[in-house]
Image (cartoon, rainbow, N blue to C red):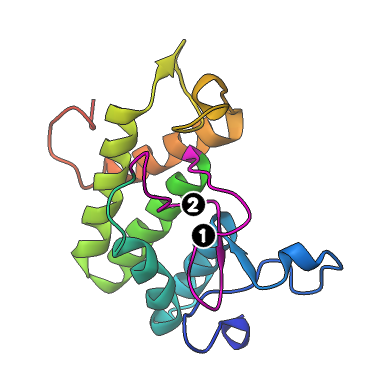
Amino acid sequence: LSATQHPATGLLESFKASTDPSLHGVAFTYDLALAALVFTHHRTFEEARRIVEFYRSMPLPTLHVPDYNTAYGIARRLPTLEDAFQVGPVAWVAIALMRYAEATGQLIYGEKAVQLLEWVRTHLDHFHGGLVMGLREPWVSRMSVENNWAYYAALRLAIRSLSDGPLRE
């Protein structure tokens, strides 16, 4: 897996063997979070750090900046294919950040994960016990079981390190 990381950016191409040219050189956030989890699990922390630092260094999401996009070009680390923020990928990033923080003792990564989860809690609409998928149409009125399960899993992981407060509740 580490041999597939882009030498300059550390991102990994999601569909390297795809016949679809639009997918060449593209890394999806889900895949990057999973790769960071695998690297962390195998204690290859430098490889994991290159991915988690990419996300940790981003500002919190806004309507105007495509940070935490669903896909990035691996060579320049710029959003590609679509301008979409969705809860599921962000929840997986939070999980990867927390696991990396636990494994390395570098708490700044866990702190960023909690900031992301708190941002989602306070900025995305909740309906009937679930969370909408994103910030922009059509995602502001759509819900996904997968996205909600990932968010729930991230919250369950975060609760171990949280003091009392709104996110813990």
| 134 vs 16: above or below | above
Which residue is at 49% across, 66% downward?
78
Q: Which residue is mark 1?
A: 79
The amino acid at mark 2 is Asn
Residue for point 40% across, 53% down: 67
Q: How would you rate the neighbour count of disc 2 (Cα within 10 Å): few for under 14, some for 14-19, many for 20 or more?
A: many
Quarter that holds the N terminus: bottom right
Q: Secondary structure at mark 1?
A: loop
- For discs 1 and 2, the disc positioned in front in the rendered view: 1
Disc with the residue nearer the chain's start (1 vs 2): 2
Left or right: 34 as drawn, with respect to 67: right
Main SS class of the magenta portion in the image: loop
Q: Position of residue 138 (x, y in %)?
A: 58, 26
- Residue 143, by quadrant, is top right
Q: Residues within 10 Å of mark 1 (few under 14, many from 20)?
A: many
What secondary structure is marked by label 2? loop
Tell me the residue that label 2 is attached to.
69
